[in-house]
Amino acid sequence: MSEHHAVIAWARESADFTYDSYNRTHEMRFKDGAIVIPASAAPAFKGNADRVDPEEAFVASLSSCHMLTFLAICARKRLTVESYDDAAVGHLEKGGKTKLWIARVTLHPRVRFAPGTTVDAETLARIHHQSHEECFIANSVNTEITVEPRN
């Protein structure tokens, strides 16, 4: 149905190339280079804490997809949303054969509806459930994803 492109660009900055010495800094480029995100490995893997790491980008991708799906569902139901924010958390864990993976992501969305828009807790839970079921990114991964709305 559609294609989505990203360019990852890295160049060695160190004199030698050992596990302890090579740089992890790189760029994630989108839209033919019009959008550039400074990236690195996570600090636990000798990366730069001032840059986005792949694990953070993965968690943000899941959160963003859930939000966009949620907004689309609300719009179709004529439920006007004023604001939406999420404090998503991903958990890197050891899986089978000690391989690391993002095993769990918990979304903590806070939704503010427009004055005059009434949504009870049960309806809100149903919309979040449907959002999870329809999220393209959630449908593409094995990570356990839970939604714990905040007030």
Image (spheres, rainbow, N blue to C red):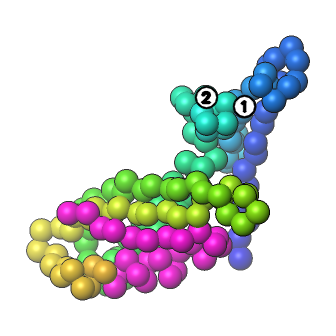
Q: Residue 149 magenta-drawn?
A: yes
Range of magenta residues: 126-151
Q: Position of residue 67 (x, y in %)?
A: 42, 66
Which quadrant holds residue 131?
Answer: bottom left
The residue that mark 1 highlights is 24
Q: Position of residue 55 (x, y in %)?
A: 60, 50
The residue that appears at 33% across and 77% down in the rendered structure is 74
The residue that appears at 53% across and 64% down in the rendered structure is 104
Give the number of the disc on residue 92: none
Which quadrant holds residue 70?
Answer: bottom left
Do labels 1 and 2 touch, CB within 8 Å? yes
Q: Spatial distance from mark 1 to mark 2, Cα to Cα? A: 7 Å
Q: Is the C terminus in the top left, top right, bottom left or bottom right quadrant?
A: bottom left
Determine whether 57 is above or below 70 in the image.
Answer: above
Residue 72 visible in image: no
List the single residue furthest toward the left.
116
Q: Residues within 10 Å of mark 2 (few under 14, many from 20)?
A: some
Q: What element does badge 2 sit on?
A: loop
Q: Position of residue 11 (x, y in %)?
A: 82, 27
Asked whether, in this view, residue 71 is left or right of residue 34, the answer is left
The residue that appears at 37% across and 77% down in the rendered structure is 128
Q: Amino acid at mark 1?
A: Arg
Q: Is the N terminus in the top left, top right, bottom left or bottom right quadrant?
A: bottom right
Q: What element does badge 1 sit on?
A: loop
Q: Amino acid at mark 2?
A: Asn
Q: Residue 142 magenta-drawn?
A: yes
* Residue situated in front as seen by the camera: 77 or 122: 122
The residue that mark 2 highlights is 48
Determine whether 41 is above or below 105 in the image.
Answer: above
Asked whether, in this view, residue 52 is left or right of residue 40, the answer is left
